[in-house]
Amino acid sequence: MTVDFTVTRNTNPTSPERRAEILADPGFGKHFTDHMVRIDWHGDHVDSGEWSNAQVLPYGPLSLDPAASVFHYGQEIFEGIKAYRQADGSITTFRPEENAARLNKSAQRLVLPELPEDLFTEAIRQLVSIDADWVPSGDGESLYLRPFMISTEAFLGIRPAHEVSFFVIASPAGNYFGTPKPVDIWLSTNYARAGVGGTGEAKCGGNYAASLAAQLEGEANGCKQVIFKDPNRDDAIEELGGMNVFFVFADGKIVTPELTGTILRGITRKSIIKLAQERGHTVEERRFTLEEWRQGVASGEITEIFACGTAAVITPVGKLKAADFEISSPSGEDGGAVTMALREELVGMQTGKVEDRFGWNVKL
Ligand code: PLP
Ligand code: COI
C-alpha cells in the first residue's frame, strides 16, 4: 500500500542545546520529540472503511469532541517499539512486522480497523526520519515509539466508532527502572488484570488502567512492579503489569508462562525464546505455579528470574512479596549470568554489535 504523507514541519522545535540536555539523561517517557504521525480512518464497518489523511505534524495537543467514544468506552489500543542508533550512525527498528501484527490483533478484539502492516512501518519511518536527531546513541538507549489508535467519533450509543485515528509519538529512552539492579515484585491477590474471554491478550489502555490499583499496592509495599496470577486458574503465574516473565533453572532449563489468551504476546519474549534455544537452553512454555516458584527458589533449582519487554528490555527480578508471604530473590545483586548474557545478546543484536542472524533489524 502506498500512502503519501503530508509533512508539516514544527516551526518552533526544541533547541539543539535543550535536546542535548534531554538526551544526556532521557529517563523513560518524560520527553517527546518535535513531531508526530497521524492517519485517519472512516468507515461504517471495520472491514470496509478507509485510511486516509496520513500526516507528519508538529507534536502537540489533540482537539477531540468531548463525546469522542474513546473517552467513554475506551476503544484504544497501542504498541511499544524502539528505534536504535547503530555504530555507523544509521537507525534501525526491531521486528516491526510483529508489532504491526499485534496491533491488528488488538484492533480485532477492540473492534477497531486494522492498519496495513506496511503503513505501520512507513509511519514509524516517517517519524524517525524527521526526528532522527532525537535517537540517542548511549549504551542501552533508544528512541521509544508509541503507536496508538483511538476512536474519535462523537456519539454516546454503545457501538464501534466509525471514525478512528492512528498516531505515533516518540520519546528518547534510557533505563526504564532507572537502575539495572533486580526489581522486587508484588503479587497481586486483590486485583486481576485479565480473565478468560477478556482483553488480556490485547494491548489496550483498559488493561493498564485495571493494573494501576495493584501497582499502587505494590509500590506501597516497596515493589516497583506487580505480577498477576491467572484468576481462572488460581495458582498459575501470568505476567507483570508491563512485562513477561522467565524462570531459569540450575540445569539450564528456562520456563515461561504459556500464552493462554490472557497475557500479552511479548515480542521480547518471543525473541528471547529463540535466542535461549540457540544457546542450548530447553525452553518450556507452560503453566507455571506459585508453588513451583516457592519450591524452586527454596531448593536452589531456580537460579534466576527475569522480566522482559520493549521498554524494560531484560530486567532481573528480585524478591516476590505478597500480603502474607515472601519468596527470596534467587538472582544475584547484578542479575544472573544467563539473564545478563541474554540481555547482552539481545541488545547487541538490536544495536548492531552482535550479528543479526535472523534479519530482525529493519533499517529506517
Ligand atoms: N506484557 C505486558 C502487559 C506489556 O505491557 C508488555 C510490553 O509491551 C509486555 C508484556 C512485553 O511485550 P513486548 O516484549 O512486545 O514489549
Ligand atoms: C512496552 O514495553 O513497550 C510497554 O508498553 C510497557 C510499558 C510498561 C511501558
Image: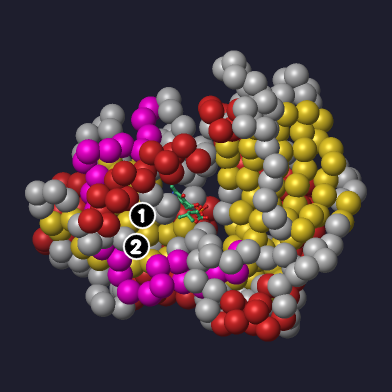
Give the number of marks: 2
Please name the amino acid that badge 2 sits on: Phe
The residue at label 2 has a CB less than 8 Å from ligand 1: no
Q: Is residue 62 left or right of residue 202?
A: right
Quadrant containing the N terminus in the rendered view: top right
Residue placed under numbered mark 1 in the picture = 245
Residue shown at the point (72%, 20%) measured from the top left:
45
| Residue 297 position within the rendered picture, expressed as x and y whole percent measured from the top left | 16, 61
Q: Is residue 121 left or right of residue 197?
A: right
Q: Secondary structure at mark 1?
A: strand
| Residue 4 position within the rendered picture, expressed as x and y whole percent measured from the top left | 90, 48
Q: Are marks 2 and 1 in contact (CB under 8 Å)?
A: yes
Residue placed under numbered mark 2 in the picture = 306
Q: Residues within 10 Å of mark 1 (few under 14, many from 20)?
A: many
| Residue 312 position within the rendered picture, expressed as x and y whole percent measured from the top left | 45, 63
Range of the magenta residues? 171-196
Residue 339, by quadrant, is bottom left
In space, the residues marked 2 and 1 are separated at their CA atoms by 6 Å
